[in-house]
Amino acid sequence: MTPHVSSDLHHVIHELGHFLPAQAPLKDFVHHNTLHAFQHLPFHEALQTAAENFGYKTYLSVESFRELYAKNKINEDILDRVILAHKGKKESAKWKDAMLHKDCKKQPDAIVGRIRKVWQSHYHVNLDKETHTTLFRMLGSYLDQGIAIWKFPVPSKGFLTAIRNLESNSFTNLFKTERAKILLFDPQTKLEDLLDILVGSKVYFRQYLFDQQFAHPGWSGMVAVLEHQPQSLLDKKSISLNDLIFVECLLEIDALDRRLGENWDPLVKHLPEDLLPILTKTEGKEYYEVLKMWQEAFEWTYFDQVIRGLQLSHEKDFKKEATSFQALFCIDDRCCSVRRYIERFAPDSQTFGTAGFFNIPFFFQPEHGKFMTKVCPAPVTPTHVIRESEAKLRHEKDSHFSKHSKGIFGGWAISQTMGFWSAVKMAKNIFRPGPTSAMVSSFSHMDPKGKLSIECKSTDHKYHGLQVGFTLEEMTNSLEGLLKGIGLVKNFAPLVYIFGHGASSVNNTHYAGYDCGACSGRSGSVNARVGAYFGNHPEVRKALEERGISIPVATQFVGGLHDTTRDEMEFYDLDVLTEDNMLRHQNNLQTFEIALDYNAKERSRRFDTVDSTQEAAKVHEKVKLRALSLFEPRPEWNHATNALCVIGKRESNKHLFLDKRAFLNSYDYGIDPEGKYLLNIVKAVAPVCGGINLEYYFSRVDNQRLGAGSKLPHNVMGLIGVANGIDGDLRPGLPRQMINIHDPLRILITVEHFPETVLKTIKTHDATYEWFANEWVRLVAIHPETKEAFLFKGGEFIPYLPLAKQIEKVQNLDELLVSTSENLPVYLLS
Amino acid sequence: MENQIIISSFVIIPFVGFLLSLLIPEKNELGLSRMAFFTISLQLASILGYIGYWLIVLRARPVNIPEFVLYQHHDYEFLIDFYFDKVTAVYLFVGAFVTFLITQYSKYYLHLEEGYKRFFNSILFFYLAYNLTVLAGNFETLFIGWEMLGISSFLLIAFYRNRYLPVRNAVKVFSIYRIGDIGIILAMWASHHLWHENITFLKLNNEQLVIEHLSQHGGIGLFIALGILVAAAAKSAQLPFSSWLPRAMEGPTPSSAIFYGSLSVHFGVFLLLRTFPFWEHQITARVLIGLLGLATTLVAYPIARVQSTIKSQIAYASIAQIGIMFIEVALGLQVLALIHFAGNAFLRTYQLLVSPSVVSYMIRDQFYHFKPKEISVEDTFPKRLEYSLFILSLKEWNLDVFMNRWVFSPIKKVGSKLDFLTPKNLLLYFLPMYGVGLYLYFHQEYLPEGIQVFIPGTFAFIGMMMVFKAFSERNYPRLAWMLVMANHFWIALAVSFNETFDYNQTLIYLSGVTVFGILGYVILEYLRKKEPTYFDMNQYYGHVYEYRIQALLFLIATLGLMAFPISPTFIGVDLIFSHIHEDQYLLAFFDSASFIIGGIALIRIYSRLFLGPHIKNYHEKALKSS
């Protein structure tokens, strides 16, 4: 039973939960804005507030900016322009001097933590040291999903109840002192009572709880997430932030009683005079002004070129009469380059980008699976399930993970026998990496030979309350939405590919973050296969015909999967293809293969272990091996370096080299004058791409506090998170190995449409509008006819004139790519 | 002769490799990893070759190589001696093989990591220490390696030196290691007296000789065996020291794998195997060793079962297996213990290396095979018993608290009795007292009859108190530093009363103390001037962030002052012990305690000032709890 909490305190705990990190257990890892709690504030104000209150670093350091400036990665003209815009002509010189030369090494401590420090300064008790280990042990053990062999013995009816039950039925104790035990066992004890003992005055409860929970934001955040999202645990556990706080307060009382006897005063009597309350409004400070302007100068150094580049489009050159095939990809930035290569090696092809669940939200239940997995964006709750049958089991056992090796006799026998086999395996894995049962492969998400229950036989047929398969109407709606959204409504090629994407890795705790974000961190294979099924369905086509989309009989859809780590592809249900199309497909396969080779080669310039100058096919082999290498902490760079999201016709941006930094979403303003489909796109793109972008941003600028730190020492805690060592707090955010090469820029979203329409569209959806209005993502509309650019600022679109006049044309892209491992500027492709 | 050259090369190769790796610039990742890989490949190849030769040509007979005499005086000699038998062969091979794989692994794994150079330096240094210990032919040589292992372990645990927990745990592990070293020091001291020489391990194989000596001095024999057991238990994380092992898993995963999964943690077993001929005939010792192993296994096993973190689970599972190895050695099953060691080392190394994979593997396993609640053995126990055992295991049987409560807290309490000392008044107390001591030394004729017997003990006690104070000091780093220096002076004086011995020996002992003491003091003074507000021992200050060179120099000074084998004081310490008489147990205890706690106090000064989260706020830094 959870004790009753007064509404005030309830409100505080709710607020607290909002500020804590919101990362789900590892298997459900989804990118999100790390500082989501500050999103109601304008970006820079939010960053300052977060920094001052919680001690985060929210920008790169001033020194780093100066270094970038010295290396000309921040353009001086842009810098001057930014300073001028913010400070006016008179003040410019003064501010520039401050930005370039002023020493700023003295930064005050965070506001959070100041009350609880008094335990140390006044009573000489280090409460963190006294309580954290025990608390983390209890939480870890209670929430454990399968590491412990002897699981938490008390049935899960809430954390507090379980602890109470455990303690009262044991000869040994978690709590040492009398008072703490009495308080624990008395069901009448309220959280207020405990806080009264500790703090003494209601006025400070809120701030005390912030101090307490922000001393271990990792565990607290996990608890807050699980309270609202219990389905993230396969082995169900019920827990609440309130329970956690209750137990922690008890542990604190226990520790204090143990150290000081029962006669100590609550904190309120010893608080410093000048205590700053948490989360009060911040005031402008020179230091943050300096950072803000550096940040903007850094961003616009790149964005300026991009906007200029988009203005130089020569769309007509790319218009074609007939296309050999069309291919739909996810908007993911990793698809940006592979599309470029497909278009290069098959100039008569056409590629599209859209969110990788292909407008088909559902749960997928693999054969033999005991659970369902969601394969659509995280905020969507699907009402359909697709079940797999006649598939083979895709799980191999590995005795290195078995519990027997941890036992006395088992361990004795295993270490003397299998131990020597381990030595061989280890040597093999280091010198000749190959597939192991420990690896994660995007291809094992679904068995291509298995059957899927795509069509709904009867709407009454429910599985766990979900409709099995889609009705004709639903299929048609979904496909119509997909095609109209990307502007593919006529001129269908004989083959239309739908590519989902996924990733492969080994020894990677954050594997879920490498798969398709639009499929809730799963591989997109099922969605692609289902999408192709919809497209090939004669009844669906008939219904689409009535809605103005006419798909020729000769056109066929093919589902496929692109593994972004290994750069390999797989295709589904090829047996439905006609003979002609089969021939075409065989032909296209060669294009894909060479495109994948080149894509791997382009990626390899960022890989230290691969010699990028070799022939593409050779490089590709090495890239494939990387994904299987135990010792490789960076199987791929995932979304690192992302900076752009370009919404518009592919023909309008095909001429640009964007260095894998762009999410490309196909969209044709011509068939959507009202912005109906645009709304769907921005509604998804702002939180998804914005979320990815900001998570990378914050993990990069403060990898220690907002990221997970280096992954090399990480230890897996209960399968739900990682921590350092055995006593550490959980580490949400991205590990350093994911962000080494990332430049922290806010994402720039460009939309090819009339600014009035864009403005009207974004205003219809408040949550989305907030992203733009508070400038957590930047928005530029490119006028489709005049190519003028308009920047969204202060609630309106204002004209933006790029400083860049020309964009350099790249003569030999392949040579340029191998010449450097740094981020490249925008180029015109010849 | 060829034996000598080859066996010496097993130490020389890693030593040269280590020295060369120091010269390679930080940025040159490739050069660093290649140097390490080349060194260890060469070593592995030579070891394999030599083992073959040894098996076939030498028919696996033990080989002893008296390398060279570091110092000799009358009947005392400090001899570097190497020894090669089947225990050496197995340990050498496993060490070379695992290190070979791990260096190759780390070459990629550590790419772009801050401290790439430090990592490979430390690995090579560790590897040097490993070989030296494994090849050691007598206690003195072994002790050199033993000390180096302690330091390399400290450096690898505190690899992430800007975070709080790694530094705290590194100090903790170092302290426990060192407490265990008391055992080995006292064993060395007692064996001087038992054999009247620095006995080689080869001679211990002479059953006749051992039995003869032990029959005359059964008490000393047991004392030595117990000393060895304490040292072995600490190094191999047996009771009551077990809790350090999981806490040592703070460095990059490959370093945890090599250190705490495989090599370092099996040194207790090594020490037992190495000294087996010596205690083979002491039934009491064998029973104790076996019982300790058994108790550890029984305690570590349930702890392993409740662990919800992968690395601590592997750690406790490994401790339980090492407990069994202790039993095996006690039973005289040497070959079995060696096979068990090798298998366990490989298994745990691999398990640790693939430990991050456990998430995807187990989640998938669950996804396909989930059963809501599996019944474990413990569920069949009565509820109260089950819950009690669960809580006890969750709290690691309070082993972590145990060391604090029974060892470190009492020392701090004693030390705090000297809280009136400050850096300013220390000399006011020290000089007159020491002056009196010196006066007495030169005028021993004034000493009343009967008093003289107590003088060495008393002076050593004063010295020990200084070290205790240094260990518990919270405010003044310079005071703690000077107290450790002063301790050495007291010890030297105390032992001088025992017999008139050569001033040269005192000189050897105190020269290192003086040189490194002054170096350290100068750095402290410099740091105090630069950072007056961030200069005490109340918390970690992380000054290494801004003072890298000073931190390195201070570390060297620290090592020198704690009589690490870079300083002549190291030989001095051994010399001093050779002058402590057989019946002066107290003096031997005070002296060894000073040596041990002094080392801990010094590492504490270094850690508090230079390591941990940086006190300044202008750059990103981790939360203390992370």
Image: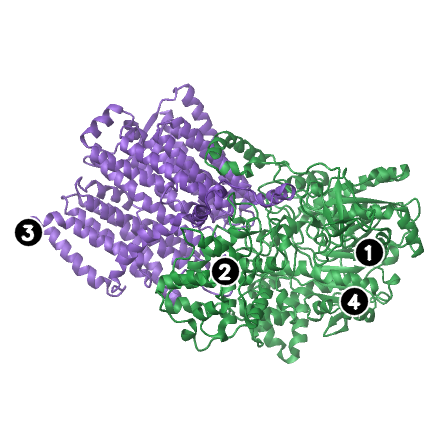
Residue B254 drawn at (x, y percent): 51, 43
Q: Nearer the viewer, residue B124 or A400?
A: A400
The amino acid pointed to by label 1 is Arg
Q: Which mark is residue A650?
A: 1
Residue linked to disc 4 = A781
In terms of depth relative to the viewer, which is nearer, B235 or B369? B369
The residue tagged 3 is B448
Name the quarter where the N terminus of chain A is drawn: bottom right
Q: Is residue B284 left or right of residue A719?
A: left
* Front one among A407 and A642: A407
Q: CA distance from mark 4 to mark 3?
A: 101 Å
Distance from Cα at disc 1 to Cα at disc 4 = 16 Å
- Check contact, mark 2 vs mark 1: CB within 8 A: no
Question: For this view, does A27 lie left or right of residue B438?
Answer: right
The CA span between labels 3 and 2 is 61 Å
* Of the pair B29 and A61, the residue shown nearer to us: A61
Is residue A670 toward the left or the right of residue A115 in the image? right
Q: Residue at x 67, y 54 (%)?
A: A639
**Type of amino acid at the residue the image marks with label 4:** Ala
Amino acid under label 3? Pro
- Residue located beneath label 2 in the image: B623
